[in-house]
């Protein structure tokens, strides 16, 4: 294997991944670069440069920003364990400046690297245990790693008590059917509310009128995912969600669905974009088929 590295060539490739048209070709070359470790070092250095740019009031370099996004993507695809630290730093750095694209790219890259990420990210979770937003970020990553760990399960149960809708989403990513009874109970509690009020959550604009519609829409896909052991990308997924809707919903006669302790479920007060909602970018596609695809 080649031990020397042509830094100028790597710099040229990095500039190329900052341009959308050339990015895929350049990424392919970087993946095949013989001096893999040095390639990771160069990509990591570019991420650090984007940190410095984000923390100053100087001119914004859009090419550096775009290159950093592609660098995250490549580091994840390379399963670059050596880059775990810089990717975690990237998440911490961009949170304050709210660069959502680099934030998402870093998060997804850590998930792609997989099991080696568990211990450093769990340490961050414990460090931020009293910070709801930060804790949510680390838990999101932990559920993407393909690792079964009792600490993750405990964290998901704890998070459910403060934000069940988001916790259920993470349970779907984690994919453990142990959570199925909890998810079923929550979805059924939303169904009881909707049926008693004769609300059809599939009707246009109903999400704006009742927060329980949002709760149902955001959780019933996870119910299908866990109950039928099927992923969101399965070609039959949407049909199975429609079947569940037909099974549970009626706008005529309320169903007698047991709530357990009788309490209405907690509903997150802010409304986020649902997977089946129109994408806010204006493409006309569903969010999950457009900007939410990542």
Image (spheres, rainbow, N blue to C red):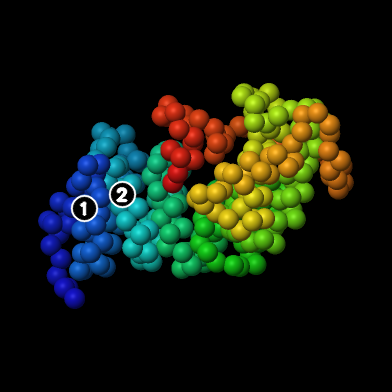
Look at the numbered discs 1 and 2 and tell me whether their residues touch, using CB distance below 8 Å: yes
| Quadrant in which the N terminus is drawn | bottom left
Q: Which residue is mark 1?
A: 26
Q: Nearer the viewer, residue 163 or 258?
A: 258
Q: Is residue 242 above or below residue 157?
A: above
Q: Is residue 71 above or below residue 247?
A: below
Q: CA distance from mark 1 to mark 2?
A: 10 Å
Q: Is residue 85 left or right of residue 25?
A: right
Q: Is residue 121 left or right of residue 109?
A: right
Mark 1 or 2: the one toward you: 1
Residue located at (51% from left, 62% from top): 145
Q: Which residue is mark 2?
A: 70
Residue located at (74% from left, 28% from top): 199
Q: Nearer the viewer, residue 273 or 206?
A: 206
Instruction: Estimate how packed mark 1 is, as few (under 14), some (14 to 19) or many (20 or more) residues with alpha carbons within 10 Å.
Output: many
Percent position of residue 130, x then y: 63, 50
Image quarter for residue 270? Answer: top right
């Amino acid at each position: 294997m080649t031990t020397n590295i042509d830094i100028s060539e790597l710099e040229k490739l990095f500039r190329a991944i900052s341009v959308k048209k050339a990015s895929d070709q350049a990424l392919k070359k970087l993946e095949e670069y013989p001096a893999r470790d040095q390639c990771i070092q160069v990509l990591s250095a570019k991420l650090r440069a984007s940190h410095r740019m984000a923390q100053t009031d100087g001119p914004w370099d859009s090419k550096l920003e775009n290159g950093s996004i592609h660098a995250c993507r490549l580091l994840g695809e390379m399963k670059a364990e050596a880059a775990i630290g810089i990717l975690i730093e990237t998440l911490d750095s961009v949170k304050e400046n709210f660069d959502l694209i680099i934030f998402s790219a870093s998060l997804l890259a850590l998930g792609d690297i997989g099991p080696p990420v568990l211990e450093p990210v769990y340490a961050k979770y414990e460090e931020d245990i009293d910070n709801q937003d930060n804790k949510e970020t680390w838990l999101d990553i932990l559920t993407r790693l393909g690792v079964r760990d009792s600490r993750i399960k405990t964290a998901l149960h704890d998070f459910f008590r403060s934000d069940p809708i988001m916790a259920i989403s993470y349970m779907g990513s984690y994919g453990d059917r142990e959570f199925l009874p909890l998810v079923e109970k929550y979805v059924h509690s939303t169904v009881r509310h909707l049926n008693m009020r004769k609300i059809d959550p599939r009707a246009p604009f109903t999400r704006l009128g009742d927060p329980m519609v949002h709760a149902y829409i955001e959780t019933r896909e996870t119910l299908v995912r866990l109950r039928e052991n099927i992923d969101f990308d399965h070609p039959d997924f949407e049909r199975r969600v429609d079947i569940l809707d037909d099974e549970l919903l009626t706008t005529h006669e309320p169903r007698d669905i047991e709530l357990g302790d009788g309490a209405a479920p907690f509903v997150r007060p802010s409304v986020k974009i649902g997977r089946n909602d129109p994408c806010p970018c204006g493409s006309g596609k569903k969010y999950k088929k457009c900007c939410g695809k990542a």
